[in-house]
Image (cartoon, rainbow, N blue to C red):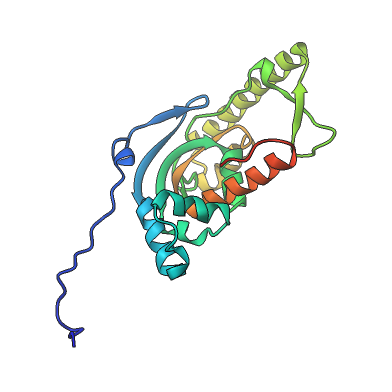
C-alpha cells in the first residue's frame, strides 16, 4: 500500500497559453484614450477539460477531442468547468462601463481610488454626430442620432462642463481640501470620466454573458454564436 506521508514525484506545472504569453503587459488602446492589458492568467482549455472529466466521469468518454468537449459544455450550458480559468486585466474604461461590470458581477475588481490619490485627468468626450436618441421601444436602447445642430450644442456644453469640473476639483486640491471630501467634484462628471483598475475575470462569467447575448440575438432573429 502506498504511504500517503511519503513525498511524491508528481510536480505541479503551470499551464501556459502561448497566445497570452505573447501579449502579457502589452497595452491595447481603446476608445478615446483608454486601454486594456493582460497582467496575468490562470488555466487554459486543458484546465476546463480536466475539470469536466473529473466532474462528469464516464459521461464524457464519448467525446474524444478537447475542442468537442468544450463545445459540448457550452452548448448544454454546463458552465462550472469554465471556472477553472481566470484572466487578470489592467484597464482604463469609461465609468459607465466599469459600473456595468460591477452591476453584472462580471469580475473581481480593485479600482484606482480618488480617496487616496488625485483623480486621473481623463474624460470621455462625445462627438457631435454620436449623440444617440432614446428608443421608444426599448428603455435601455437607442434609436438613431440627434440632429447635427443639437449634437454640436451638446458637445460644446459637455466640453464646458468637464472643464468647469476640472477647475473646481483642482481649486479644492490647491486649497488643501481632503481628497476624500473633494471626490464629489469627480462624481459630478462620473458619466464621462474613466476608471482605472485591475479586473480578474472568470472564464465562466464570460461564458454566461455570451450565452445571454446569444439568447437575445436569436430572440430578435439573429444567428447563434456557435
Residue 6: horizontal and vertical position, in percent? 14, 81
**Towards the viewer: 47 or 127:** 47
Q: Residue furthest bottom?
A: 1
Q: Residue at the spot x=49%, y=30% of the render?
A: 121
State the quadrant of the C terminus.
Answer: top right
Residue 114: horizontal and vertical position, in percent? 49, 44
**Could you tell me if residue 37 is visible in this image?**
yes
The image quarter in which residue 132 lies: top right
**Could you tell me if residue 106 is visible in this image?**
no
Q: Residue at the spot x=70%, y=43% of the render?
A: 216
Residue 174: horizontal and vertical position, in percent? 48, 34
Total labels drawn: 0
**Towards the viewer: 171 or 28:** 28
Q: Residue at the spot x=79%, y=39% of the render?
A: 139
Residue 138: horizontal and vertical position, in percent? 80, 37
Q: Residue furthest right?
A: 136
The image quarter in which residue 146 lies: top right
Q: Is residue 18 left or right of residue 1?
A: right
Q: Is residue 34 left or right of residue 161?
A: left
**Towards the viewer: 35 or 86:** 86
The image quarter in which residue 8 lies: bottom left
**Towards the viewer: 85 or 38:** 85
Q: Residue furthest top?
A: 149
State the quadrant of the N terminus.
Answer: bottom left
Q: Residue at the spot x=57%, y=27% of the render?
A: 124
Q: Is residue 117 left or right of residue 154?
A: left
Amino acid at each position: 500500500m502506498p504511504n500517503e506521508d511519503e513525498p511524491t514525484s508528481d510536480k505541479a506545472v503551470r499551464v501556459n497559453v502561448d497566445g497570452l504569453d505573447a501579449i502579457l503587459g502589452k497595452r491595447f488602446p481603446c476608445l478615446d484614450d483608454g486601454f486594456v492589458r493582460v497582467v496575468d492568467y490562470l488555466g487554459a482549455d486543458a484546465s476546463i477539460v480536466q475539470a469536466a472529466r473529473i466532474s462528469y466521469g464516464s459521461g464524457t468518454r464519448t467525446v474524444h477531442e478537447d475542442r468537442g468537449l468544450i463545445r459540448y459544455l457550452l452548448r448544454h450550458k454546463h458552465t462550472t468547468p469554465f471556472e477553472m480559468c481566470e484572466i487578470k486585466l489592467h484597464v482604463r474604461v469609461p465609468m459607465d462601463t466599469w459600473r456595468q461590470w460591477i452591476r453584472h458581477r462580471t469580475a473581481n475588481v480593485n479600482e484606482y481610488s480618488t480617496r487616496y490619490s488625485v483623480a486621473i485627468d481623463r474624460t470621455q468626450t462625445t462627438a457631435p454626430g454620436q449623440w444617440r436618441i432614446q428608443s421608444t421601444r426599448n428603455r435601455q436602447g437607442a434609436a438613431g442620432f440627434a440632429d447635427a445642430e443639437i449634437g454640436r450644442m451638446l458637445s460644446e456644453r459637455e466640453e464646458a462642463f468637464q472643464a468647469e469640473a476640472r477647475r473646481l476639483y483642482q481649486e479644492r486640491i490647491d486649497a488643501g481640501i481632503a481628497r476624500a471630501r473633494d471626490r464629489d467634484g469627480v462624481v459630478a462628471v462620473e458619466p464621462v470620466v474613466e476608471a482605472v483598475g485591475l479586473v480578474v475575470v472568470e472564464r465562466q462569467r464570460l461564458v454566461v454573458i455570451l450565452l445571454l447575448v446569444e439568447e437575445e440575438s436569436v430572440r430578435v432573429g439573429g444567428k447563434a454564436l456557435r
